[in-house]
């Protein structure tokens, strides 16, 4: 949620409550970001890393991880864009 939207939605609250809500929203955004990152790491590691014979990834594993991460991030961006489109459409219908 954008800070501008936050302040507009919390207009009637006391400053202390506004601050508390802003802190809570920031914490939720951090938690969601960490969940997305952990999901990305787990998915790409599981799909791409086959052996533990070396400390470093093989060239094939490295390529797989890069491709996997790129696809995951593109998908996440597309979902975010679609969600924003739907929210904007819902806001204009009100």
Image: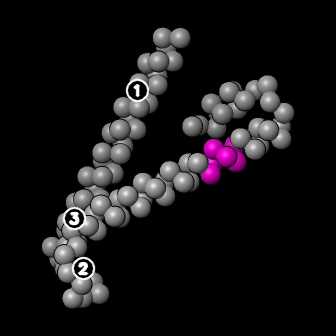
The foreground one among 11 and 35 is 35
Residue 25 location, quadrant = top right
Nearest to the observer: residue 47 or residue 75: 47
What whole-number distance in Å separates the C-alpha atoms at marks 3 and 2?
13 Å
- Residue 35 located left or right of residue 30: left
Is residue 25 shown left or right of residue 57?
right
Q: Between residue 67 and residue 33, name the one nearer to us.
A: 33
Is 25 magenta? The answer is yes
Q: Counting other residues with Cα less than 10 Å from the Cα at mark 3, is it few (<14), some (14-19), or many (20 or more)?
A: few
Is residue 30 visible in the rendered image? The answer is: yes
Q: Pointer 2: residues within 10 angstroms few (<14), some, or many (20+)?
A: some
Could you say which quadrant of the image residue 84 lies in? top left
Q: Which stretch appears magenta? A: 22-27
Which disc number belongs to residue 47? 3
Q: Earlier in the sequence, mark 3 or mark 1?
A: 3
Position of residue 17 relative to residue 26, above or below, is above
User: Residue sitting at 30 percent across and 47 percent down?
Assistant: 74
Q: In front: 51, or 93?
A: 51
Q: Is residue 90 left or right of residue 29?
A: left
Give the CA separation, mark 3 to mark 1.
Answer: 32 Å
In the picture of the structure, the residue carrying the numbered disc 1 is: 85
Q: Is residue 82 above or below residue 59?
A: above
Look at the numbered disc 2 and give the secondary structure of its residue: loop
Question: Residue at label 2?
Answer: 57
Q: Residue at x 49, y 14 (%)?
A: 92
| Element carrying mark 1 | helix
Q: Quadrant of the N terminus?
A: top right
Helix, strand or loop: magenta stretch: helix
- Residue that extends furthest to the top in the rendered view of this protein: 93
């Amino acid at each position: 949620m954008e800070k501008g939207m936050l302040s507009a939605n919390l207009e009637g609250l006391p400053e202390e409550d506004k601050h508390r809500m802003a802190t809570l929203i920031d914490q939720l955004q951090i938690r969601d970001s960490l969940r997305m990152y952990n999901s990305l790491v787990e998915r790409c590691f599981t799909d791409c890393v086959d052996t533990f014979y070396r400390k470093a990834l093989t060239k094939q594993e490295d390529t797989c991880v890069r491709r996997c991460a790129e696809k995951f991030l593109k998908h996440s961006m597309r979902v975010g864009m679609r969600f924003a489109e739907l929210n904007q459409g819902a806001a204009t219908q009100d």
